[in-house]
Image: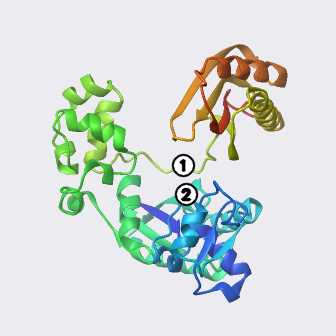
């Protein structure tokens, strides 16, 4: 049997969970985000049903804009506990099969399996998820994570598609490098400086030149992505958070320094409390500030020693905030902490 990677991606996950518990919403445009009130400013769409997407509603869009595009949509608040529970149910279904499941988020997982008929396995997994959870998923099949995830894009919504190395360039070669999972606009701009614009350009690029431009690890890895990704095995291990953060987009811009420091302390104490409950410790503190013009800056500082002392985190956050050249209002404020690795159990 050949070894395959299957990428299981739940369709319109948050909206689907809401429709599952409110069947009367089936077939209607549903938008999930914030507290569900599009009249309140500075709230954004977390996800939209396919019916809402037909009107141009997209994740990350202000709820107010979504309401203008699709006034007949049903707007619902985000419900993290419900999505956590639904995701756990789906992953439990996948793990009930003799496969390796690598969870990547609420709505997606990679599955490693040996099979002579990966399409049949994909269909079995998809049917089991639908039967046991009432949720729909698409499944991409490939020899690597990148191939499988790219195939899922061809399969959505609710289908199955296979993409193998032999077909990678034919399918993806003429597309911009940003079509590759993991390559964003900044990396694409730097690749363009090297004359690399398409996936095929990247596949044929000189790995030594890429190493000089991006470093000895990232450079060659980018070329591997251009070739369809590496074939490191799927592992059934939980993703361990390397950091935690709390941030808030204010309903009205904050102009008072005292008010801003009060928000900063609240966020710093909240994120420190989460770290403490998780049994981790903090090594670095970072503060993010965004202006009404969406200009965003982040400053970070390493602590003298690891800690879970909220007073230390608050004090460091205040020092970082003082380093910003604040000459106006603040739209968003955030505090992020970098964590020590979890302690392995004996």
Instruction: Tell me the element at label 2.
Output: strand
Q: Is residue 255 visible?
A: yes
Local crowd at mark 1 within 10 Å, few (<14), some, or many (≥20)?
A: few
Find residue 230 and report its image quarter.
top left
Find residue 114 and report its image quarter.
bottom left
Q: Earlier in the sequence, mark 2 or mark 1?
A: 2
Q: Quick check: marks 2 and 1 in contact, CB under 8 Å?
A: yes
Q: Residue at x 83, y 37 (%)?
A: 277
How much space separates mark 2 and mark 1, taking CA atoms? 6 Å
**Vertical position of residue 192 compared to residue 300: above or below:** below
Find residue 116 and report its image quarter.
bottom left
Q: Residue at x 20, y 27 (%)?
A: 209
Instruction: Tell me the element at label 1.
Output: loop
Q: Residue at x 37, y 44 (%)?
A: 184
Q: Residue at x 34, y 68 (%)?
A: 162
Residue situated in front as seen by the camera: 233 or 13:
13
Count of marks, rendered view: 2
Asked whether, in this view, residue 201 is left or right of residue 94, the answer is left
Image coordinates for residue 68, horizontal then vertical, percent = 54, 71
Question: Image quadrant for the N terminus?
Answer: bottom left
Local crowd at mark 2 within 10 Å, few (<14), some, or many (≥20)?
A: many
**Vertical position of residue 24 compared to residue 227: above or below:** below
Asked whether, in this view, residue 200 is left or right of residue 281, the answer is left
Residue 235 is tagged as: 1
Residue situated in front as seen by the camera: 225 or 185:
185
**Vertical position of residue 4 compared to residue 49: above or below:** above
Image coordinates for residue 134, horizontal then vertical, percent = 64, 80
Residue situated in front as seen by the camera: 93 or 109:
109
Residue 100 is tagged as: 2
Residue 271 is tagged as: none
């Amino acid at each position: 049997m050949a070894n395959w990677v299957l990428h299981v991606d739940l369709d319109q996950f948050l909206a689907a969970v809401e429709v599952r518990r409110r069947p009367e919403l089936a077939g209607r445009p549903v938008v999930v985000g914030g507290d569900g009130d599009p009249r309140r400013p500075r709230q954004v769409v977390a996800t939209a049903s396919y019916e809402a997407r037909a009107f141009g509603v997209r994740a990350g869009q202000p709820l107010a804009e979504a309401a203008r595009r699709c006034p007949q949509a049903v707007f619902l608040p985000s419900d993290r506990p419900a999505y956590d529970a639904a995701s756990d149910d789906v992953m439990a279904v996948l793990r009930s099969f003799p496969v390796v499941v690598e969870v990547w988020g609420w709505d997606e997982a990679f599955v490693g399996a040996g099979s002579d008929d990966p399409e049949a396995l994909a269909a079995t997994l998809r049917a089991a998820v639908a039967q046991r959870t009432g949720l729909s998923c698409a499944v991409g099949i490939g020899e690597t994570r990148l191939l499988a995830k790219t195939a899922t894009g061809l399969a959505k919504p609710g289908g199955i598609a296979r993409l193998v190395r032999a077909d990678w360039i034919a399918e993806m070669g003429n597309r911009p490098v940003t079509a590759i999972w993991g390559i964003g606009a900044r990396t694409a701009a730097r690749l363009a400086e090297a004359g690399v614009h398409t996936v095929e350009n990247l596949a044929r690029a000189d790995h030594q030149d890429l190493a000089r431009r991006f470093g000895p690890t990232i450079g060659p890895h980018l070329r591997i992505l251009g070739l369809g990704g590496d074939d490191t095995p799927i592992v059934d291990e939980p993703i361990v958070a390397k950091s935690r953060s709390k941030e808030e987009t204010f309903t009205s811009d904050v102009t008072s320094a005292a008010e801003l420091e009060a928000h900063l302390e609240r966020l710093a104490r909240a994120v420190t409390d989460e770290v403490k409950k998780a049994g981790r410790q903090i090594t670095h503190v970072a503060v993010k500030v965004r202006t009404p013009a969406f200009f965003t800056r982040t400053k970070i500082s390493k602590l003298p020693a690891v800690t879970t002392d909220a007073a230390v985190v608050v004090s460091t956050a205040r020092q970082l905030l003082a380093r910003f050249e604040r000459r106006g209002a603040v739209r968003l404020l955030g505090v992020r902490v970098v964590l020590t690795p979890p302690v392995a159990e004996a």
